[in-house]
Amino acid sequence: MSSDPLFPALARGGTAPAVRFGERELDYARLRRAVLATAARIGDARRVALWATPTLETAVGALAALAAGAELVPLNPRSGERELAHVLGDSAPELVLAAEEVELAGLPVVRPDVSGDGPERDWPSEPDDEATALIIYTSGTTGPPKGAVIPRRAVRATLDALAQAWAWTEDDVLVHALPLFHVHGLVLGVLGPVRRGGALRHLGRFSTAGVRDELAGGATMLFGVPTMYHRLAQDVGDDPALAKALAGARLLVSGSAALAPRDHRAIEAATGRQVIERYGMTETLMSTAVRPDAAHRPGTVGTPLAGVELRLVDEAGLPFDHRDGESVGEIQVRGANLFAGYLGRPEATAEAFAAEGWFRTGDMAVLDPDGAVRIVGRKSTDLIKSGGYKIGAGEIENVLQEHPAVAEAAVTGEPDPDLGERIVAWIVPADPGAPPTLDTLADHVAARLAPHKRPREVRHLAALPRNDMGKVMKRSLGAA
């Protein structure tokens, strides 16, 4: 149990800048009053939903719920009616925090107070570390979304481990435009800077000009997803002011999906700065990260964070430590960063864990000689068994995206009577009028990886289907 507030700087108040969305900004003293006024509106509600629009109200509402000791259920405003009905029915919140009037299962709507002009109040006592902070719903790729129950100790452990890895302090100013209904944008992007006592500047909507202006105006860190960094990579060579702003940032972090090596190289060539990556998921929050002072190889996501144990296991569930960059295994992790289980699903929770508290991530990876983790895909969609080999789709995708005729690439496996599964490349051509041929791409992959990893079929698309976090929805490809 911890008696220390989850957000010490917020509990103290003060005149340092805290959060800014567009033209609306609160320092720590005014944010403290706004959070406590909103917590009073929440009252004794045990569980509350959050209509997570990219607004100041969302940030205040999230902090208020955590200050009040309520369990927070972030909602994606772009979810369809069926998914929203499932999440609300499954989690049964007592009210919804929202910046606007919304009709959600008849729930009362509480609008967070963002004036910061309320009366001074005492900071509430800190709940137990095992108390639930958040219930975040998974993407539901293998069925209805499940609510991952995230305790306060997991939030504390992840944010403190990242602070150690990245030397993240109260002097840092974070800029991002991430959605606020999931781990990346909400936990790392809102709770992270407030836990440190630093500042957040949220762009509302991503633009390279917005990033340029905020970094040029004193922001020190940028969080983004690959689609954002791809746009930065496209613009940075022709925009000296953008290149200068990115070069002046202390930390450029990409997450939620792999960043293409081409984009890594374009940004580094123009700025002299590397984009670093990290690895996590809803159930684990953050597990690994590249350190800023480490030589980062595109495709790797660093080494385990402090307090996180990580291992690879084979198909029999036996751990191995082959640091050869080739031996593929499933990642399992354990540590204080883990979730407590799936809401109301004890069977699913038990199935998610191996013996001795190891969580089965379902992600496949290899270990490089220095211990860095390189993700090669999801066990359910990205592990391809072809010709007696186990092949990770991710490494093929990275190589395909290095070809000048390829704008985007995804790789799947499909049943094959001879090979077991054949490798299929889904390609968005750089020039739709001259798409790359199968032979061209097969030779490109075989020369850089191994002949058995070459695609056996190529399908051209105008765009890859992606979710709000930039991840390719491969099940949609399979149905195409």
Image (spheres, grey):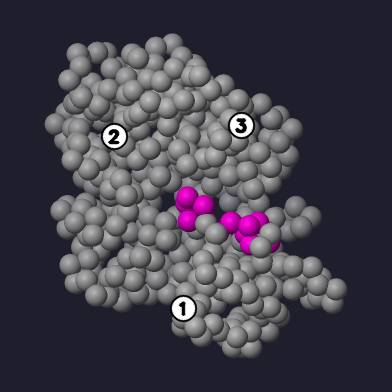
Residue pictured at 22% horizontal, 66% vertical = 242
N-terminal label among 3 and 1: 3
N-terminal label among 1 and 2: 2
Q: Nearer the viewer, residue 126 or 236?
A: 236
Residue type, numbered disc 2: Leu
In front: mark 3 or mark 2? 3
Residue type, numbered disc 1: Ala
Quadrant of the rendered image containing residue 322: bottom right
* Residue indicated by mark 3: 86
- The reply to whether callout 3 and callout 1 are in contact (CB within 8 Å) is no
Q: Classify 10 Å Cα crowding around label 2: few (below 14), some (14-19), many (20 and above).
A: many
Q: Nearer the viewer, residue 381 or 127?
A: 381
Q: Is residue 62 above or below residue 70?
A: below
Q: Residue furthest right?
A: 417
* Residue indicated by mark 1: 430
| 254 inside magenta stretch | no
Segment colored magenta? 467-478
Locate residue 411 relative to residue 254 in the image: left or right: right
* Residue indicated by mark 2: 56
Residue pictured at 48% horizontal, 46% vertical = 286
**Residue 71 place in picture, x, y as percent:** 48, 24
Q: Classify 10 Å Cα crowding around label 3: few (below 14), some (14-19), many (20 and above).
A: some
Under tag 3, what secondary structure? helix
